[in-house]
Image: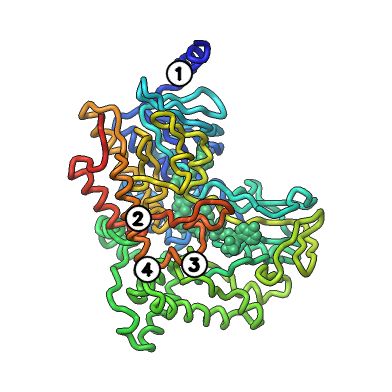
Amino acid sequence: AMVAARASEETRKAQQVDVAVVGAGFAGLYLLHRLRRAGLTTVALEEADDVGGTWYWNRYPGARCDIQTIDYSYTFDPDLETAWTWSEKYATQPEILRYLGFVADRYDLRRDIRFKTKVMEAKWDEATERWQLTTSNGPAVSCRHYIMATGCLSAPKPPEIDGVKDFEGEVYFTGRWPHEGVDLAGKRVAVIGTGSSGIQSIPMIAEQAAHLTVFQRTPNFALPAHNGPAPADRLGLLQGDRAAYREQARWSMAGVPYPQQTSVSWQLSEAERRERFDKAWAAGDLVHILSQLWADQGVDLDGNRLVADLIREKIREVVKDPEIAAALTPHDHPFGAKRPCLDTNYYATYNRPNVTLVNLRQEPIKAITANGITTDKRSFEVDVIVFATGFDAMTGAIRAVHPITGRGGKSLSDVWADGPQTYLGLTVAGFPNFFMITGPGSPSVLSNMAVSIEQHVDWVVERLAALRDAGFTTIEATETAQAGWGQHMADCSMLTLHRLANTWYTGANVPGKVQGLMPYTGGVGPYRSICDEIVARGMLGFELT
Ligand code: FAD
Ligand code: N01
């Protein structure tokens, strides 16, 4: 009885809203705006002390977007689009963070955000048909609907290397870079990791440090960004017919308005292929090179190898030392199966006299000691270690809220013991009124996230408003619909090459994590039409009460 009394006392003291949003990044901000406009009361809970999400946390030198900024923006308000002008083709982290702050101010969003507040646990209460969220700070939250906008790449992965605690120098994580910046001048710096974060920061760190030692386990494909002003042709298309340009992005495969490529590699001569490749290389655009060369590059190993070989040739051209060039050249995965990187001077950095590459495939790290890093073969004394070791992607931040308890006392971590199961990547059977923005099972990280986030938020908010207007209080995916989505996910995953690489898309980067391709590979446009069709067919696969 005492426990029940305490529980009801907590509920009474809790902040009462229609919808609670966790996270104040790209997704959380847009959610707040849409929910308010739909007449739903709302609060966002955010661990950080300001808005921005990814762009709040990742302040390492060289941090930028790798989808052209004219595409990596909100599109829901044409006035917002004309009120903001990006200064570069690929904006820097500070500029994107300013943009998100500008959006928060423009729509007066901060008044509904509780900063420095982490959501710790969430529980569905069957009697009241409400979620109760426990927070690290301030009152609990009682809400009809619980939406996690917690990010696909927001939970940094622990370093998993013995001795980190023994190191007496400075330690930084790219995903938690100090806000006041770091002075690396004159220091001996180690960077561990050569994914997008490593590849963006390494050239900048090399310019500042006395010496930089890069510890590489797996080489990645990187393409030159050729940053500068937004390209005139893309800008022309956007300004020529903004609405059509945005609409094309929404129905495209990757959320960027490029046409579907129809010719396959073997229909093209070698000269034609090289011409297409050179044009793509000069464009400095990931989505262009991933989608515009030939139609079989992303779905067939032979078509893929032709692109990969041309990129490998480029690496050999830039890196002067053939042994270093060989170590930097990826051979273990098809191009695009692992997220490729966009770089500025990355490969050329290895021609600098103050940069050393350590190939961990030949000499694995044994331990981190008080004054440096020891491999099987050598010891490196350093003053600073930078971990660019990535994230517990897609499920990390969701599972960090623990437990999330649904109907019948079932916890999400039990339901997901063999990997995430969802309906549309948006909801989970047994968890009524619970939504994830860009959750596992949605196109999310295989797309321009700005477009995917807007699609998810629009869809969810419109459903919640329709639910309310029709007099229902709960919405829940059926087990059958969820199993069907799992089957469709598996079918689609057989069509692309993503399944052939060990990546954070598959959980392979986190020791002990269940393996399986987490994003939906069917494309942004097809996914949108599925979501729309579900509505048109009277919320197929959902149970409303
Ligand atoms: P996030 O921006 O990650 O925001 C989630 C927020 O939730 C965070 O602020 C976090 O503090 C908060 N949170 C999480 N758990 C809790 C909790 N329990 N309680 C309270 N708060 C919590 N995508 C692209 O499409 N193009 C790009 O060019 C691109 N560049 C990227 C560059 C970097 C360095 C990284 C790391 C990612 C990049 N991405 C890019 C992916 C990027 O994460 C998304 O584009 C987008 O910013 C995600 O927005 P979000 O709001 O969904 O999540
Ligand atoms: O993380 P990653 P990230 N010992 O997982 C290595 C987005 N993003 O932060 O491949 C030694 O890609 C690991 O090696 P391996 C983008 O979607 C975008 O760089 O596991 N090494 C790998 O080299 C991106 O894909 C931008 O063998 C260890 C690296 O660390 C995603 O975020 C910028 C190790 C991690 O690479 C994640 O990128 C930044 C260990 N114990 C991020 N553990 C843009 O450019 C890990 N590694 C827009």
Q: Are marks 1 and 3 in contact (CB under 8 Å)?
A: no
Residue for point 40% across, 37% down: 147
Q: Earlier in the sequence, mark 3 or mark 4?
A: 3
Residue under pointer 1: 11
Question: Comparing marks 4 and 1, which lies closer to the viewer?
Answer: 1
Name the element at disc 1.
Answer: helix
For the residue marked with disc 1, what is the amino acid?
Thr
Residue for point 51% across, 57% down: 504
Q: Tell me residue 534's x, y (percent).
A: 23, 46
Q: Earlier in the sequence, mark 1 or mark 2?
A: 1
Name the element at disc 3.
Answer: loop
Question: Comparing marks 1 and 2, which lies closer to the viewer?
Answer: 2
Work out how far the residue at label 1 is from the one at label 3, CA to CA, in angstroms: 52 Å
The mark found on residue 489 in the picture is 2
Question: Comparing marks 4 and 2, which lies closer to the viewer?
Answer: 2
Residue for point 19% across, 40% down: 538
